[in-house]
Image: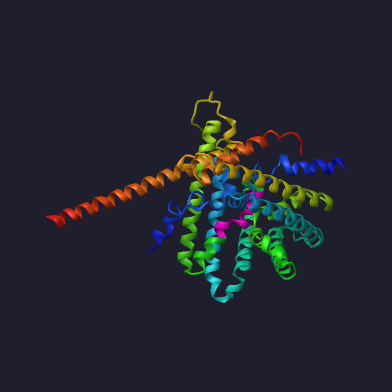
Amino acid sequence: MNYWDIFKKGIFEMNPIFRLALSLCPALAVTSTVFNAFGMGICVLLVITLNNMVVSVVKDWVNPKVRVPMFITIIATIVTLIILTLEAYFPAIYKELGLYLELVVVFAIILARAEVFAMKNGVVASAIDGLGMGAGFTVAMLFIGAFRELFGTGTILGGTSLAMQIFPQSYNGPMIIILAPGAFIVIGLMIGMFNVIGEYQDKQAAKAKAAAQLTVQRSEAV
Amino acid sequence: MMEYFTLFMGAVIVNNFVLTRFLGLCIFFGVSKSLSASVGMGMAVASILTVSSALAWVVYNFVLVPYDLVFLKIVVFVVLIACFVQFLEIAIKRYAPALYEMWGIYLVLIATNCVVLGVPLINASANFDFIKSVINAFGSGAGFALAIILMASLREKLQYADVPKTLEGLGIAFILAGMLALSFLGFSGMIPL
C-alpha cells in the first residue's frame, strides 16, 4: 500500500466520525461553530500523528503485554504538552474547548490507530496514517460545524476576523441547531446521508460489475 | 444541606452528562440496545465514578497541589483510574465470580472512558471540597444511568417501529437521543450554577 492510499482511507472510507462512529463526544460538543470545530480537529490531528510516531518508534522495546498503559501514558503526555502550548499562545481556543481538549486523552480513535496501525508499521507510514485519520476527523468536524453554524445563525466563522454573513442579516434560524438536541439530530441525519451515499456507490459498483459480466457473456457468445 | 441537594440535582438533570455535556457517548450508543445491559452499565458507571472521583480528589489535593504538579493532572488521573479499575476487576474476579459474570465486561469498557475521567477533571477545576466532589460524581453517575436506561427503554420499543431504511441503527438512535435531549433542555436554568 503506498502512502497516498494510507492517507486517503481516513478521509472517506474509514472516516472516524461518520464511518467508524468513534470519538463522537467532541463531534457533538464543540461543533456549534466552525472555529471551535477546526481548533479541535487540528488538536486531534496533532495528537494522533505524534502518538502514532512515538508508538511506532518505541514498539520494539516494550513488552506487548503492557502496551495499553504505554499508549495511555504517551497520549496523556502529548495532550498535556498541547494544552500547555495552547494555554500559553492561544488562550481563546483553550477557553472555548476547555474540558473536551483534556478528554482527548481517552479518544477511542487515537488508541485504536496506535493498536491497529502504529504497532505494526514504521514511523513514516504511521505518521501518514495519523495525518489521514486526523484530516478525516477535521473534515467531518468542519462539515458538522459549518452546517450547524450556517443554519443556526446564518454566518460562518462568526465572532472571528474572517466572519462571513452567508444568509441575510434578517435570517432568524432555528436556535435548536446550535443547542444540545440539534447536535444529536444533525449528526443522526448526516449518518443517514452517508448511508445513502454508501448504498448508491454499492449499487453503482454492482451495476458496473453486471455490465462487465454482460459484455463478457456477449463476447463469449460471439 | 440545600446546597448539596442542588448540586446533586444539577448533576443529574440540568447538566446531564450524556444529554447536555455529550460525554460517554460511545458507551451510551453502544450499550443502550438492551435494557438489562443498560441497567448494569448505569450502576457500574455510577459506583466506579463515585469511588474514582474520591480517589482522584485525595491524590489531587494531597499530592499534586502541595508539590505544585497540577499540570500533570491528566496523566496522573488517567493512570490512577485505569489502575484502580484494573485492580477492581482482578479483585472482583477473585472474590466474587458471580458479580464478575454480570459486571466484568462493563469494567473493561469503563477503564478509559471520558465519563470517568471527566468528573475528576471537573471537580479539580471547580475546586470542590471532598463532600461536594463525591456528591457531584455520584450525581453525574446517576444522571448517566438515568439517560442510558431511558434510552434503552425507547430503543426496545423502536424495534417494533417502521424506521426508514437509511436511518436504521445509529442514525435513528441519534435522532432519538436528540428528542431526549430536547426534553432535558426544559430543565435548563432551573438550578443556576
SS assignment for the magenta stretch, majority: helix
Percent position (x, y) of residue A64?
57, 73
**Residue B40 quadrant:** bottom right
Can residue A197 be seen at all in this image of the molecule? yes
What span is in magenta? A99-110
Q: Nearer the viewer, residue B186 or A88?
A: B186
Asked whether A100 falls inside the magenta stretch, the response is: yes
Asked if residue A68 lies left or right of residue A118, the reply is right
Percent position (x, y) of residue A113?
52, 61
**Residue B79 quadrant:** bottom right
Give the farthest residue toward the front.
B160
Q: Nearer the viewer, residue A85 or B24?
A: B24
Residue B41 lies, with reference to residue B19, above or below; the image says below
Can residue A163 be seen at all in this image of the molecule? no
Asked if residue A30 lies left or right of residue B143, the reply is left
Residue drawn at (65%, 52%), measured in percent from left and top? Answer: B36
The quadrant of the picture occupied by the N terminus of chain A is bottom left
Percent position (x, y) of residue A62?
58, 74
Asked whether B67 falls inside the magenta stretch, the response is: no
Percent position (x, y) of residue B110?
66, 58
The quadrant of the picture occupied by the C terminus of chain A is bottom left
Count all numbered tags in the image, as a single digit. 0
Give the farthest residue toward the top.
A170
